[in-house]
Image (spheres, coloured by chain):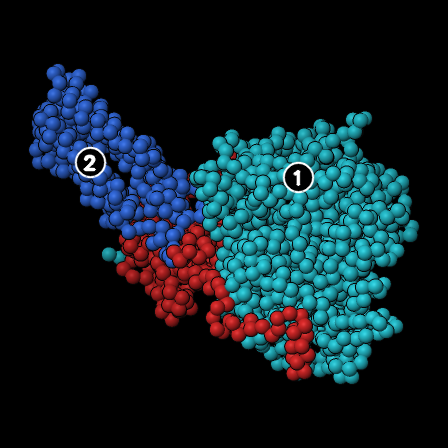
Chain colours: A red, B blue, C cyan
C-alpha cells in the first residue's frame, strides 16, 4: 500500500558523521555483499570485467571539496549516501503498484520486489538518488536498513545492525531510533547539530548527517598561551647547556 | 533526465490520441459509420499505442495489471485507471457511432472528460515531482492539456479550434520554458542544501564510483544550451507555426494531414526537451547543475 | 485508511556455517567470518573477536567473494609456448612443472647457487620463504620491502628498536594529539581508521602532514600540505623550536636514550664520534649520583645529560650536547625552512607549541607500579599523550631514512615513545638491533647460505660484499651504495640482472610480484629487459619462474607459471617469527586455512616450495637420509621448529603439563585449535608490563617466557646512531673496510649519526625549473595494488585514475573537465586524463597507484577503462638516476637503505588534445584464462 502510515512506532535510521568518514567505501561494499546474498534479487553487475562496468549499489560514497570563504585551505568531505527512510517519502506515494511501502512499525521504506513493475517513477521521485533499478532483475532496489539483519534471531544481538554500520572502521555510521529523543543516535544528533539533506524538499528524512568539525585552527603561535610554550630558554647551544644544567638540578 | 524514446513516444502519441477522443466524445466532428470508425481507429492506435509504448521501459511489463491498484495515492496508477475507463467508455460511445450510427452524448461527454483526465493524470505524474523543479508547476498539466487538445483538434479536422488551440499551446509552451529555466535556481535546492555543507564554496570533487550507474544513466543527462535552443525553435516551428501555416493554406486533406504530422513531430521534440532539460536534483550530488 | 504492508521474513537463515580465517585482500590481515551456504562462500564480514579489526572490515575485505571467484584465477601450471611477453602458454601437469623447476634449480644449486634470484612480493610467509632460500643457498633473496617502506622499518629499528604499523601503534586510548606524516591507505588499514574514530570520540586532535588532503588527512583537524620530500626539514624545525624552548623530556632522555652517552669529540682520534666504552664494551655515562664515569646500565646509575668528561687530552661530550649544537642552529629555524617546506613559519611554530603543550600540560599517569632495567621501581607510569605515525609519504624518498629517523627522534625528545598516550610497540617489538641478525651472503655450491640473508649491519664489516669488495647480491643490497638495505632491493633485481651488474643470473624466480607492471620502476623498460635477447638470440635473463594466483601482467613474462591458490583456499601462518598481528597489549598470530577447496588444478605456493625442497633434497626440509620432513605447508607450520620449542605459531603448543603457549613442543592438533579459536591466537601482556617495554623488567621477563627473546634484552634508544658513525668514519678513511672513492662524499653526508635533511637526490640531478612539479601516487582505500582490478565490485569504484592537479596548475594551463595532459619527467612522457583538486599542495600532482592495467591481463576486456584511461605513473620513474657521465649506474634509491625513491619524481605538464587512450599504450597480451562474463547475478543461497 503506497499510502504512508500516519505515523510510525519508531523511526529507525542512520546517523552519518561527516567529520569522521575517511571515504574508505567499506560500507559500500559490505552493503553490496549482504544485499546481493540476501533480501530480494541479487544486486547485479553489467560488464563486470568489461569497458563499462556498472552495477547496482544501495550505498555510495561521494566526495565534496569546500573552499572556505576565509581563504583557508580547501577541505575534502567524504559523503556516504543511501536511502534516508523519509517520513514523507515521495517514492512511496508515487508507486502505482504498492510495491513501495513504508513500514508502520519502524518507518523502514522497502520495495516488495514481486509487486514492482520497474517503472522507475519512485527513483524519479527521490531527490537523493537512493533507488537504483537493477538492470538484470528489472526491479527497483534500495537500502532496506538491513531489515533482514536488525531483527534477525539467527544473528547474535550485537550483530543486529545494518551491514554498513557493523563494518564501518571509522565509526562514522550510527544506527538507532531517531523517533526516541533519548536514544543514542538522537542525542548524537542533538549534540553535534545533525541536519537533514535537502530540507526544502519536504521529505523529512529520518537519517541525519553530522557536520565536519571546524578545521585548521593551528595557524600561528601568536596567542599568549601558545607563546609561553615556545618561550626560548636559550639563544644558542652554549646558553642551552647552561639551562640544561639548571634544569637537571631540578629533576 | 535521460530522454527515453518509449516515454517520449508514449506521451506524444497518447496525448494526441486522447486529445482526439476528447473531440470525438464532444461530437466534433459528428461522424458515424465508416468515417467514425476511421477516426476512432486513429484515436485508439495513438492512445493505445502510446500506452503500450510506455510499457516498454518497464522492468516487468507482465505485472502491469498491478498498477491499477494504487489510484488513491499514485498519479501513475490513476493514469492507468482513468485511461482504461476512458478507452472503455469511448469504445462504447464509438461502437454506437460506428455500428448504430447513433451518438449517445452523455456517454461521449463522460468519455471526453475521462480522456482529458487521462492527459491530466499523465501530466501530474511529472508535475508532482519536487525533484524536478522544472516540472513541478501547474503549467505542466496546462501544457500537456493544451498540446493534447491542439493535437486532438488537428486530428479531428477542427480547423477553427486548431487555429485557436495551437497558438494557445505555443504560448503555454513558451511560458513553461521561461519559468522552467529559472525553476531549479528558485527551488532553493543547491549542492549546499543537498550536502548540508557550508563555510565556503562546495564543489563535487569526484563521483562515488568511476563506473557508471542507473542514476547517472537516468538522471544525469545534460543537453547543451545552444542545442536546446535549436530544438525549442524546431519544437515550436513544427508543433505550432507550421501547422497553423498549413491550415491557413489552400487545400483540405493533404495540408491537414501534413499539419497533424508536423505537430506530432513538434510535440515529440518538445517532449524530448521536457526530459532532456529536466534537471533532476539528484544531479547536484554528481556535480551536475541538475540531472 | 488502514495501512497494509507485505509480510517480510526478518529472520532468514544467514548461512549454514561460519568459517573464520584471515583476510588477504591487503596486508592488514584482519580476521574474517566467511559465511558458507551449500559449501560456497556466501558473505564475508569482520570477526568481532579478532585483535586487528574487532569486527570491522574495509571495502577490499568485504569484496573478497569477488576475488575468490575472479575469472582471472589461474587454472593449471603453464609452460610458455610463444615468445616471452606474448602470454602464449600451454597447460601442463604439476608433475611436469615440478620436474622442469627441479631440473633448472638443481643444476644452479650444484654449480653456482647465486645464479638463482628468488624474490617474493607481497609474501606473508617470509620467515618460510627465506628459510627455503637460505637452505637452497642463494644470497639473492628478499621480499618487496625494498620498494615498499624499508626506510620506515630500518630507521625505526636503528633508532628505537621498532617502527610503525606491525611494529607498533599509537596509544589510541590515551593519546591527545596524533600527528601523521605521509599516510595514505598503505598499511594498517583498519586499525588506523578505528584509531581515528576512537580519537574523534575522545576529542583528541589529529594533524595530517601530506601534500594531498584525502582520506585520513581529510578528517584531520589540521592539514599541513607540505611540499614532498621536505618532511624531514619540517620535523627538524619542530625539534629546533622544542629544544630552544626547553620543551623536551630530560628525565626520559637521561634514563631511556643514549642522549647521556659520552662521545669522543677529538677529531684527530681514531675513535672520533664513537662512544666511550668500558673494558667489556658498555657505553659510559657520567653518573649524577657520584659524578663519575659509569656504564649506562648499572643499577642505580642516574645518567647525566650535561657533564663533560676528559680522558687524557680527549674530550667526551654527552650526545645531548651534539643534539643541542645541531638543532639549535638557525638553519632549522621555522623562517629558514618555511619556504622549502611550503609551510608558513608561524604555522610550524603553532604546531610545535601544541606538541609542547599537550606533551607537558596534559601529562598523564597510570597507576601502575613497574621496575626498570636498572632496578629502580616506579610507582606510576607517566605518559606524554602525543603520538605519531608515518608511512610511505616520507619513506619513499631518497632522504626517507634520515627523515624517518628525525621523526623518531622528535617523539623520543618529547618522551612519548612506549609511554601512556604515546607510541607503543607490539610484540615481538621492541627488539634492538643487537637482537636482529646481520646479513649473510656467502654462497657455496650444493650448500646452504652461511646464515640469514637479511639483517641489520652494525658496521662496514657486516656488508654483503665479495672478497674483492664488490656487491655479493644481485640487488646490491648491503653494499656501499646502500649499506643498511635491511629488506633487500627487489626493484633493482631485473635491472641489475639484465645489465649483468654485478653478475648475470640464470633463473629469476618470483612470487606475487607484478614486476612487469605496477611493482617496477620504469615499467616499460622492465618489460624490454625481460624480453631482451643476447647475440645468440637467447634471453638475457635466461629463465623465469613465476607463481601467482591470478593472470597478472607478470605471468606473460614467465617461462614456467606455478598457479597459486586464492586466500580462502590455502594454509598460511602470520607468525611471530615474521610479521605478526600483535597489538600493543598482546602478542598475537594467526592462520589461514582452506575454507573452500580449489576448483582448479592449483596449489599453495608454500606447499609447492616444500615439494621442490624435497625433490632438491634441501637441508632443513629433508632428514639425513634424504626423506622429506614435511608433506606440505600445513605440516611445516605445525611441526617446524626454528629453535627448540619455537615454531611458526605460538599458540597451543605442547608443554610438559599439556597445552601451553609461546615455548613448547609441536602439537599435531595445533591448527585445529587455531580454527576453533577463530583462526588466531592472542596472549595478553600483564598491565604492569604493557608500557615502558624496552626498560620494563616485567615485560622483558614476559617476552622471554613467550619465546620472543631468549634472555632479557633491555636497551636504550639510539638518538645518536653509532652504526651510522662507523660507516661515516669508514668514508673518512678509517678502518680496514673502505668504500669506493666515488661514494665517500655521499656516505659522509648521508650516514650522519644524528638526523639530517638533504634534498631528494632526483631534485639535485633534475632541473627544477624544467620540471617544476612533484608527482606522487597514493593507494586508494578501496583498492590494493593490482589485485583489486579483477574484482568486479572494487573496479567499479576505481576503474580509472586521473592525474589530480592543484588549482594553480589547473588554472595556469586553462584545463577544463575532461581534458588530458602530457606529463613528462626526465625519463619519459605520458598522456593522461586530468582532474582538478583544490585540497592539494600547489606544486604537486598525484594519482592513484596501480589502477592502470595492461590489455589482456586480469581477464579484463581489452577496452577496459583500466587499460584505456587508467595509467601507471611508474613509466616516468627510472630505477636509476639520470647518467652523470661517470659510467656508473646510480640507483634511484635512498643511499642509506636502498628504498626505492618513488616520490622524488619531478615532472612538467602541458595540455594536449585527448588521445584515443592514455599513453604509453601497449599491445594486448594473450590472456591464459580468457575473459570474464558479461553479467554477474551472484547469489549462492536460494
Please give the residue where the numbered disc 1 appears in the rendered image: C522
Q: Nearer the viewer, residue C783 or C159?
A: C159
State the quadrant of the C terminus of chain A: bottom right
Residue displayed at 22% across by 42% down: B179
Task: Name the side, left or right, on which A19 lies relative to C175.
Answer: left
Q: Nearer the viewer, residue B42 or C768?
A: C768
What mark, if any, has residue C323 been given in the picture?
none
Query: Under tag 1, what secondary structure?
Result: loop
Q: Nearer the viewer, residue C210 or C487?
A: C210
Near mark 2 (Cα within 10 A), the count class, few <14, some 14-19 or many ≥20, is some
Question: Where does the image place residue C926, in percent across and percent down from the top left?
Answer: 64, 30
Alpha carbons under labels 2 and 1: distance apart: 60 Å
Disc 1 is attached to a residue of which chain? C
Question: Where does the image place residue C768, in percent across and percent down from the top left?
Answer: 60, 44
Look at the numbered discs 2 and 1 and tell me whether their residues touch, using CB distance below 8 Å: no
Asked if residue B28 shows in the view, the reply is: yes
Residue displayed at 26% across by 41% down: B181
Q: Nearer the viewer, residue C759 or A60?
A: C759
From this view, report whether residue C388 is shown above or below residue C360: above
Asked if residue C661 shows in the view, the reply is: no
Residue displayed at 67% across by 48% down: C761
Please give the residue where the numbered disc 2 appears in the rendered image: B174
Amino acid at each position: 500500500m503506497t499510502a504512508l502510515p500516519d505515523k510510525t512506532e519508531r523511526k529507525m535510521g542512520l546517523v552519518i558523521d561527516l567529520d569522521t568518514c575517511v571515504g574508505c567505501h567499506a560500507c559500500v561494499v559490505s552493503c553490496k555483499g549482504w544485499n546481493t546474498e540476501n533480501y530480494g534479487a541479487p544486486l547485479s553487475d553489467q560488464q563486470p570485467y568489461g569497458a563499462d562496468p556498472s552495477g547496482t549499489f544501495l550505498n555510495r560514497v561521494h566526495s565534496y571539496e569546500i573552499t572556505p570563504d576565509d581563504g583557508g585551505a580547501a577541505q575534502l568531505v567524504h559523503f556516504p549516501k543511501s536511502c534516508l527512510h523519509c517520513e514523507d517519502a515521495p517514492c512511496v506515494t508515487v508507486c502505482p503498484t504498492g510495491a513501495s511501502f513504508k513500514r508502520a512499525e519502524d518507518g523502514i521504506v522497502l520495495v516488495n520486489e514481486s509487486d514492482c513493475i520497474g517503472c522507475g517513477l519512485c527513483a524519479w521521485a527521490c531527490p537523493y538518488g537512493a533507488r537504483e533499478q537493477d538492470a538484470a532483475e528489472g526491479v527497483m532496489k534500495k537500502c532496506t536498513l538491513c531489515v533482514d539483519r536488525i531483527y534477525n534471531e539467527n544473528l547474535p544481538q550485537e550483530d543486529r545492525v545494518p551491514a554498513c554500520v557493523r563494518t564501518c572502521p571509522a565509526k562514522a555510521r550510527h544506527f538507532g531510533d531517531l523517533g526516541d529523543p533519548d536514544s543514542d543516535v538522537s542525542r548524537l544528533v542533538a549534540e553535534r547539530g545533525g541536519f537533514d539533506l535537502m530540507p526544502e524538499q519536504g521529505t523529512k528524512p529520518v537519517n541525519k548527517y553530522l557536520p565536519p568539525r571546524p578545521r585548521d585552527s593551528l595557524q600561528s603561535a601568536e596567542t599568549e598561551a601558545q607563546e609561553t610554550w615556545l618561550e626560548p630558554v636559550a639563544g644558542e647551544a652554549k646558553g642551552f647547556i647552561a639551562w640544561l644544567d639548571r634544569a637537571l638540578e631540578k629533576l | 533526465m535521460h530522454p527515453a524514446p518509449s516515454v517520449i513516444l508514449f506521451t506524444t502519441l497518447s496525448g494526441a490520441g486522447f486529445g482526439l477522443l476528447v473531440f470525438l466524445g464532444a461530437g466534433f466532428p459528428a461522424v458515424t459509420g465508416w468515417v467514425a470508425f476511421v477516426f476512432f481507429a486513429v484515436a485508439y492506435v495513438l492512445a493505445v499505442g502510446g500506452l503500450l509504448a510506455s510499457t516498454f521501459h518497464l522492468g516487468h511489463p507482465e505485472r502491469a495489471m498491478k498498477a491499477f491498484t494504487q489510484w488513491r495515492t499514485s498519479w501513475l496508477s490513476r493514469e492507468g485507471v482513468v485511461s482504461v475507463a476512458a478507452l472503455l467508455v469511448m469504445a462504447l460511445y464509438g461502437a454506437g457511432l460506428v455500428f448504430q450510427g447513433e451518438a449517445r452524448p452523455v456517454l461521449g461527454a463522460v468519455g471526453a472528460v475521462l480522456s482529458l483526465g487521462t492527459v491530466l493524470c499523465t501530466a501530474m505524474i511529472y508535475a508532482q515531482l519536487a525533484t524536478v523543479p522544472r516540472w513541478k508547476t501547474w503549467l505542466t498539466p496546462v501544457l500537456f492539456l493544451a498540446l493534447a487538445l491542439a493535437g486532438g483538434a488537428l486530428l479531428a479536422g477542427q480547423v477553427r479550434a486548431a487555429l485557436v488551440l495551437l497558438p494557445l499551446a505555443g504560448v503555454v509552451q513558451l511560458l513553461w520554458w521561461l519559468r522552467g529555466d529559472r525553476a531549479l535556481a528558485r527551488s532553493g535546492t543547491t549542492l549546499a542544501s543537498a550536502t548540508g555543507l557550508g563555510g565556503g564554496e562546495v564543489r563535487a570533487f569526484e563521483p562515488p564510483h568511476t563506473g557508471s550507474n542507473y542514476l547517472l544513466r537516468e538522471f544525469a543527462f545534460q543537453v547543451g544550451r545552444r542545442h536546446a535552443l535549436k530544438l525549442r525553435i524546431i519544437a515550436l516551428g513544427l508543433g505550432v507555426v507550421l501547422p497553423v501555416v498549413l491550415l491557413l493554406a489552400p487545400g483540405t486533406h493533404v495540408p491537414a494531414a501534413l499539419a497533424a504530422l508536423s505537430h506530432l513531430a513538434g510535440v515529440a521534440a518538445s517532449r524530448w526537451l521536457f526530459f532532456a532539460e529536466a534537471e533532476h536534483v539528484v544531479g547536484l550530488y554528481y556535480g551536475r547543475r541538475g540531472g | 485508511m488502514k495501512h497494509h504492508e507485505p509480510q517480510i521474513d526478518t529472520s532468514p537463515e544467514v548461512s549454514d556455517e561460519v568459517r573464520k580465517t584471515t583476510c588477504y585482500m591487503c596486508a592488514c590481515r584482519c580476521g574474517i567470518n566467511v559465511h558458507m551456504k551449500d559449501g560456497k562462500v556466501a558473505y564475508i564480514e569482520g570477526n568481532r573477536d579478532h585483535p586487528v579489526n574487532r569486527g570491522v572490515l574495509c571495502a577490499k575485505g568485504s569484496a573478497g567473494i569477488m576475488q575468490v571467484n575472479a575469472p582471472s584465477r589461474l587454472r593449471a601450471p603453464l609452460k610458455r609456448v610463444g615468445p616471452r611477453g606474448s602470454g602464449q602458454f600451454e597447460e601442463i601437469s604439476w608433475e611436469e612443472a615440478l620436474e622442469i623447476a627441479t631440473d633448472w634449480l638443481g643444476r644452479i644449486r650444484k654449480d653456482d647457487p647465486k645464479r638463482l634470484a628468488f624474490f617474493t612480493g607481497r609474501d606473508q610467509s617470509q620467515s618460510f620463504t627465506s628459510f627455503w632460500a637460505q637452505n637452497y643457498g642463494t644470497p639473492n633473496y628478499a621480499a618487496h620491502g625494498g620498494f615498499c617502506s624499508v626506510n620506515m622499518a630500518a630507521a625505526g629499528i636503528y633508532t628505537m628498536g621498532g617502527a610503525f604499523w606491525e611494529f607498533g601503534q599509537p596509544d589510541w586510548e590515551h593519546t591527545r594529539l596524533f600527528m601523521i606524516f605521509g599516510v595514505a591507505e598503505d598499511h594498517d588499514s583498519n586499525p588506523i581508521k578505528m584509531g581515528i574514530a576512537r580519537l574523534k570520540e575522545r576529542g583528541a586532535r589529529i594533524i595530517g602532514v601530506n601534500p594531498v588532503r584525502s582520506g585520513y588527512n581529510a578528517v584531520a583537524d589540521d592539514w599541513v600540505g607540505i611540499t614532498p620530500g621536505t618532511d624531514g626539514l619540517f620535523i627538524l624545525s619542530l625539534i629546533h623550536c622544542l629544544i630552544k624552548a626547553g620543551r623536551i623530556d630530560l628525565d626520559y632522555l637521561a634514563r631511556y636514550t643514549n642522549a647521556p652517552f659520552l662521545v669522543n669529540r677529538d677529531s684527530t682520534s681514531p675513535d672520533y664520534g664513537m662512544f666511550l666504552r668500558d673494558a667489556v664494551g658498555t657505553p659510559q655515562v657520567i653518573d649524577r649520583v657520584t659524578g663519575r664515569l659509569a656504564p649506562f646500565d648499572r643499577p642505580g646509575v642516574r645518567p647525566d645529560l650535561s657533564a663533560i668528561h676528559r680522558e687524557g687530552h680527549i674530550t667526551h661530550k654527552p650526545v645531548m650536547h651534539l643534539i643541542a649544537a645541531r638543532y639549535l642552529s638557525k638553519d632549522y629555524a621555522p623562517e629558514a625552512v618555511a619556504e622549502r617546506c611550503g609551510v608558513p613559519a608561524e604555522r610550524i611554530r603553532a604546531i610545535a607549541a601544541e606538541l609542547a603543550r599537550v606533551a607537558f600540560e596534559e601529562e598523564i599517569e597510570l597507576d601502575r607500579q613497574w621496575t626498570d632495567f636498572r632496578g629502580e621501581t616506579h610507582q606510576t607510569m607517566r605518559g606524554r599523550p602525543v603520538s605519531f605515525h608515518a608511512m610511505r609519504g616520507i619513506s619513499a624518498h631518497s632522504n626517507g631514512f634520515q627523515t624517518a629517523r628525525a621523526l623518531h627522534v622528535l617523539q623520543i625528545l618529547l618522551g612519548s615513545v612506549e609511554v601512556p598516550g604515546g607510541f607503543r610497540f607490539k610484540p615481538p617489538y621492541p627488539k634492538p638491533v643487537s637482537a636482529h641478525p646481520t646479513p649473510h651472503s656467502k654462497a657455496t655450491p650444493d650448500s646452504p647460505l652461511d646464515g640469514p640473508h637479511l639483517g641489520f649491519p652494525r658496521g662496514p664489516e657486516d656488508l654483503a660484499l665479495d672478497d674483492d669488495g664488490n656487491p655479493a647480491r644481485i640487488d646490491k643490497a648491503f653494499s656501499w651504495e646502500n649499506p643498511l638495505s635491511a629488506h633487500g632491493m627487489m626493484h633493482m633485481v631485473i635491472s641489475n640482472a639484465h645489465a649483468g651488474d654485478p653478475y648475470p643470473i640464470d633463473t629469476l624466480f618470483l612470487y606475487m610480484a607484478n614486476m612487469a607492471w605496477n611493482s617496477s620502476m620504469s615499467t616499460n623498460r622492465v618489460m624490454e629487459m625481460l624480453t631482451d635477447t643476447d647475440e645468440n638470440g637467447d634471453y638475457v635473463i635466461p629463465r623465469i619462474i613465476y607463481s601467482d594466483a591470478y593472470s597478472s601482467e607478470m605471468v606473460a613474462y614467465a617461462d614456467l607459471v606455478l598457479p597459486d591458490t586464492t586466500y580462502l583456499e590455502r594454509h598460511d601462518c602470520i607468525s611471530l617469527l615474521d610479521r605478526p598481528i600483535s597489538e600493543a597489549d598482546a602478542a598475537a598470530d594467526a592462520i589461514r586455512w582452506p575454507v573452500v577447496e580449489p576448483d582448479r588444478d592449483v596449489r599453495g605456493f608454500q606447499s609447492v616450495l616444500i615439494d621442490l625442497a624435497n625433490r632438491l633434497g634441501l637441508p632443513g626440509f629433508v632428514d639425513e637420509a634424504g626423506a622429506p620432513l614435511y608433506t606440505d605447508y600445513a605440516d611445516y607450520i605445525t611441526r617446524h621448529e626454528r629453535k627448540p620449542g619455537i615454531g611458526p605459531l605460538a599458540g597451543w603448543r605442547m608443554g610438559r603439563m599439556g597445552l601451553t603457549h609461546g615455548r613448547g613442543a609441536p602439537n599435531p592438533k595445533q591448527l585445529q585449535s587455531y580454527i576453533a579459536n577463530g583462526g588466531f591466537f592472542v596472549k595478553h601482556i600483564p598491565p604492569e608490563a604493557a608500557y615502558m617495554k624496552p626498560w620494563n623488567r616485567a615485560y622483558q621477563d614476559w617476552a622471554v617466557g613467550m619465546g620472543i627473546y631468549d634472555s632479557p634484552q633491555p636497551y636504550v634508544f639510539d638518538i645518536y646512531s653509532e652504526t651510522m658513525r662507523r660507516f661515516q668514519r669508514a668514508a673518512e678513511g678509517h678502518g680496514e673496510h673502505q668504500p669506493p672513492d666515488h661514494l665517500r662524499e655521499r656516505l659522509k653526508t648521508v650516514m650522519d649519526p644524528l638526523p639530517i635533511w638533504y634534498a631528494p637526490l632526483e631534485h639535485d640531478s633534475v632541473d627544477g625549473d624544467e620540471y617544476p612539479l612533484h608527482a606522487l601516487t597514493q593507494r586508494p582505500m578501496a583498492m590494493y595494488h593490482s589485485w583489486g582490478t579483477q574484482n568486479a565490485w572494487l573496479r567499479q569504484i576505481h576503474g580509472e585514475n586521473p592525474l589530480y592537479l592543484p588549482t594553480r596548475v589547473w588554472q595556469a594551463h586553462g584545463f577544463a573537465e575532461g581534458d588530458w595532459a602530457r606529463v613528462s619527467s626526465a625519463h619519459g612522457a605520458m598522456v593522461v586524463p586530468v582532474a582538478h583538486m583544490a585540497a592539494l599542495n600547489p606544486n604537486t600532482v598525484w594519482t592513484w597507484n596501480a589502477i592502470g592495467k595492461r590489455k589482456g591481463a586480469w581477464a579484463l576486456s581489452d577496452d577496459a577503462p583500466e587499460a584505456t584511461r587508467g595509467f601507471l605513473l611508474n613509466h616516468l620513474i627510472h630505477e636509476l638516476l639520470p647518467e652523470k657521465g661517470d659510467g656508473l649506474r646510480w640507483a634511484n634509491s635512498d643511499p642509506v637503505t636502498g628504498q626505492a625513491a618513488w616520490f622524488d619524481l619531478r615532472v612538467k605538464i602541458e595540455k594536449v588534445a585527448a588521445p584515443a587512450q592514455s599513453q604509453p599504450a601497449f599491445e594486448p597480451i594473450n590472456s591464459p584464462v580468457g575473459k570474464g562474463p558479461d553479467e554477474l547475478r551472484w547469489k549462492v543461497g536460494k
